[in-house]
Structure formats: C-alpha cells, structure tokens
Image (tube, rainbow, N blue to C red):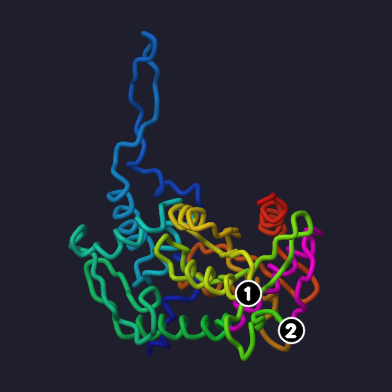
C-alpha cells in the first residue's frame, strides 16, 4: 500500500537547492575564447557569442530540466534577473515569447490567482498535473498571506524612515503611525513620507515602492509621484526595491529623484509568536526564486549592506 505522495515543492527535496551565481548554467555557451589581434600581437579574449535573447531562452530551458516540475513565471524571471544578471525587461519579453522560441516549453495560465507572474506556469514537453498545480497554488497563497501587501508596504516605509533618521541629514521625519497617510486634506494626495533636507531646505514627497515589480520607463508610479509632490508643494522622490536602467533614466528626465534599494523589505517577524521571517522565507523559494530580501524589525534594522547603500544615496547632494 502506497503512502501519500510527497509535495513536489517541499524545499527539503534535493531539487530545490538554490541556484548560485557561480552555477555553470549561467555561463555555458555564453562566452568563448577567440584570438583578437591588438598591436600585431594575438591576444586571447572572451567574447559573447550567443545573443542575449537566446541566452535567456537557454537558461529557462535549463531551469525546467534541472527542477523537473512546473515552474512559475515569477520564479524563472527572478532567477534570470537576480541570479543570472539578465536585463529584467529582456527576460520578461523572452519568457512571454517562449512558445515561439522553444516549442517544447509548455506555457499555461494554470493557477486561479491574480497576476501574470503568479499564475503562468512553465513546463517542459508536458502539461502540469493537477496535483502539481494544487501544491503550487497553495504555496503561492500561503506566501501572499505571510507577506501581504500591507505588511510589505509598512516594512518598506519603516525601512526608508529609518534610513532618513540614521543619515542625520533630514528633519521633519514623520512618526511611524503617520507613514503613508500624509495628505493635503480629506485623504487626498496621500504620500508615504515627507522630509526636509537640512543642507539645502528642499522638501521632498517620498513614494516608497516595496513591490516585486521593477520601476520601468512607462511606469505609472512616476506620474503619480509627480502629481502628489506638486499637490504638497514638494519635490518628487521615489524609493523602490528594483528598477530598470530605463526606469531610472525616465525619473532623471522628469526631475524625479530615484533611489533603488536592490532588495525587497520584509518584516523581521511574521506573527504574534515573533517567528523569524528570515527562517521562513526559504520555504517560498519555489515562488520567489532568487529575490533578495532585507528584514526590518520594530527597533532594529537587519541587512546592513542594503541599508548602507541607501544611506549613501540619501546623503548625496541633489
């Protein structure tokens, strides 16, 4: 008599060993030695011999082979960008075209969950089974309950507030219970944080975007931040977890200050029993992939490298 089937997304299974940045899959068939003549001397060099689009498609194929189970679009994209170092816009475009590039890759909108990243499932040469889809959908739902939009919003705002205080350059930093509720009256034009730069007297309306999505050139966040700043008579400032180069350039063109943290901010604990979020997050690896996280508590900042990066940008004259 057979026992219950194992959950294919149990991270204790060997397949879920996280992919490191040094993994050969990121460099295989990407670089090749060639001889280039410089000043009459033949110099061996490494040059890129495979177009980026093909590299993304190959990396996706290798991931599907390696893990052997249906994978979320979010998981594949996260590993491509945060571990493999691919451009986020390029990675997303290639993944949406996988049916045409690699016919053996099956793409299904198989999970009854809102959002393209958490509903599209990729498999290799087969369709996902009902058991696999049910297990994956449950993992996504649990992850959303643990890291709810409200929890992420609050953690991001508290993290940025802590950065402003530790920089010792800004005054009028709002109290924690006022974060996200600074309006011009009757809850209109609400901004997350308002601060004043003591070096030049500039007042900033700060919009904190602690989300999985990348800030892009066409993102509506930029226009919304400008409108809220104008309503408050302040200068616009976006602090975001991730951004494309084009998104940062779009902010510069529109005179919007932009700070990229390079990680999502999460609360240090996830329930009243004060269980560590950092210890829990590895269980969601089949959902979030290589997304980097920084953990913030009520009284203490966790993740000093990302904090130091943010502080350096906060202290730069603008």
Does any portion of residue 7 appear in the rendered image? yes
**What residue do we see at 35% from left, 55% from top?**
90
Residue beneath label 1, please? 232
Report the quarter where the N terminus lies. bottom left
**What residue do we see at 38% from left, 65% from top?**
67
Mark 2, other Cα within 10 Å: few <14 / some 14–19 / many ≥20: few
Write down the quadrant of residue 177 in the picture: bottom right
On screen, residue 104 above or below 21: below
Segment colored magenta: 150-177
On screen, residue 68 above or below 52: below
| Residue 177: assigned label | 2
| 258 sits to left or right of 221 | right
**What residue do we see at 70% from left, 51% from top?**
312
Q: CA distance from mark 1 to mark 2?
A: 19 Å
The question of residue 171 being in magenta is answered with yes
On screen, residue 2 above or below 282: below
**Secondary structure found at label 2:** helix
Q: Residue 73, position in %: x, y?
A: 36, 69
Label count reads 2
In primary-sequence order, the first of circles 1 and 2 is 2
Q: Residue 306, position in %: x, y?
A: 66, 58
On screen, residue 48 above or below 317: above
| Residue 18: assigned label | none
Nearer-the-camera pick, 158 or 135: 158
């Amino acid at each position: 008599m057979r026992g219950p089937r194992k959950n294919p997304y149990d991270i204790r299974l060997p397949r879920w060993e996280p992919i490191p940045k040094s993994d050969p899959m990121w460099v295989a068939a990407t670089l090749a030695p060639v001889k280039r003549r410089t000043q009459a001397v033949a110099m061996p060099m490494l040059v890129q011999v495979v177009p980026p689009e093909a590299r993304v498609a190959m990396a996706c194929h290798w991931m599907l082979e390696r893990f052997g189970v249906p994978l979320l679009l979010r998981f594949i994209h996260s590993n491509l960008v945060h571990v493999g170092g691919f451009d986020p816009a390029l990675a997303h475009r290639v993944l949406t075209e996988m049916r045409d590039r690699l016919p053996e890759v099956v793409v299904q909108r198989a999970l009854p969950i809102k959002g393209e990243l958490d509903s599209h499932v990729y498999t290799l040469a087969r369709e996902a089974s009902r058991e696999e889809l049910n297990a994956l959908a449950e993992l996504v739902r649990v992850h959303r309950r643990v890291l709810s939009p409200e929890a992420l919003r609050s953690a991001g705002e508290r993290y940025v507030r802590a950065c402003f205080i530790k920089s010792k350059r800004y005054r009028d930093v709002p109290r924690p219970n006022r974060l996200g509720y600074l309006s011009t009256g009757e809850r209109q034009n609400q901004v997350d944080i308002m601060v004043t730069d003591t070096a030049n007297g500039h007042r900033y309306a700060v919009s904190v975007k602690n989300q999985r999505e990348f800030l892009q050139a066409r993102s509506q966040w930029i226009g919304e931040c400008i409108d809220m700043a104008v309503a408050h008579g302040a200068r616009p400032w976006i602090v975001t977890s991730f951004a494309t180069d084009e998104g940062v350039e779009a902010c510069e063109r529109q005179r919007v200050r932009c700070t990229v943290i390079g990680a999502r901010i999460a609360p240090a604990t996830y329930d009243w029993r004060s269980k560590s979020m950092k210890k829990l997050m590895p269980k969601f690896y089949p959902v979030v992939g290589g997304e980097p996280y920084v953990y913030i508590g009520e009284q203490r900042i966790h993740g000093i490298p990302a904090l130091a990066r943010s502080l350096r940008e906060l202290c730069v004259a603008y």
